[in-house]
Each structure stands twice: as structure tokens, then as C-alpha cells.
Amino acid sequence: MSHSLSIRLNDDVFHTLQQQAVAAGTSPEELAAASLQREYRAIRGERSEGDLQAARERFERHFGEVGLDTPSGSDNESIDADLARQYADTHEAERC
């Protein structure tokens, strides 16, 4: 469902809107409607599919960013070996 809305804009605002519409290849009415829809979607916490895709891509750029020097996971033998080394170390060099 869509509705019509009449608004009054001062000359400066309308001129800017008109310039942006020309640059975007659309009408001032369509540009204003799209802008209002984006604004109110954001207020309601809704996101367009394009916004969701962009957020997903930003998130996925971080995949593989963390690299640990120590074992972490289900490799119990490696973890047990690391623990055994740490328990066996007397840390004599650190006491000096």
C-alpha cells in the first residue's frame, strides 16, 4: 500500500533535493520518498536486503583474522603436552 503526502520545502532545501535527484537520475519526489523510507526503516530497526548484505560482507572480512600461537580446540594431546611442559618448568630463570 502506498500513500501520497504533500510537504512544503523552502527554496534552499528543494534546490538541493533537485540537484541530488538529477545526479541520481531520479525525480525529487522519488528521492525524498526513498530517503524517508530509509530513515524510518532505520528508526524501526529494519534493514533492507542491501543493508544486510553489506553488513554481512563487512563481518565476513574479519573471518580468519585471529591467529593464536597456542593450541585451542579439541586437540587434547597437544594441550596436555603444553600443560605438562608448563607444570614441569621451574621458572628458575625468572627468579633472578
Image (cartoon, rainbow, N blue to C red):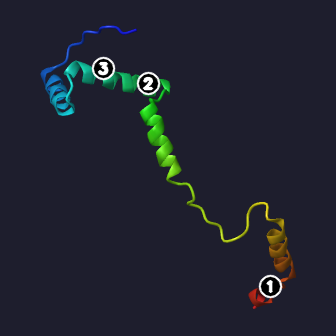
Q: Name which residue type carries label 1.
A: His
Quadrant where the N terminus lies? top left
N-terminal-most mark, 3 or 2: 3
How packed mark 3 is, by other alpha carbons closer than 10 Å (few <14, some 14-19, many 20 or more), is some
Q: Residue 10 versus residue 60: which sits nearer the camera?
A: 60
- Calculate the distance from the C-alpha at mark 3 to the C-alpha at mark 2: 12 Å
Q: Determine the secondary structure under disc 3.
A: helix
Q: Name which residue type carries label 2.
A: Arg
* Numbered circle sitting on residue 91: 1
N-terminal-most mark, 1 or 3: 3
Asked where in the image residue 68 lies, by quadrant, the reply is bottom right
Q: Name which residue type carries label 3.
A: Ala
Q: Residue 5 versus residue 74: which sits nearer the camera?
A: 74
Q: Determine the secondary structure under disc 1.
A: loop
| Left or right: 3 as drawn, with respect to 88 | left
* Numbered circle sitting on residue 70: none
* Numbered circle sitting on residue 41: 2
At which x and y percent is residue 89?
83, 83
Tell me which residue sits at (84%, 85%) in the image: 90
Tell me which residue sits at (48%, 36%) in the image: 52
Tell me which residue sits at (55%, 60%) in the image: 65
Q: Are marks 1 and 3 in contact (CB under 8 Å)?
A: no
Q: Name the residue that disc number 3 marks.
A: 33
N-terminal-most mark, 1 or 2: 2
At which x and y percent is residue 78?
80, 71
- Calculate the distance from the C-alpha at mark 1 to the C-alpha at mark 2: 59 Å
Quadrant where the C terminus lies? bottom right
Q: Nearer the viewer, mark 1 or mark 3?
A: 3
Q: Nearer the viewer, mark 1 or mark 2?
A: 2
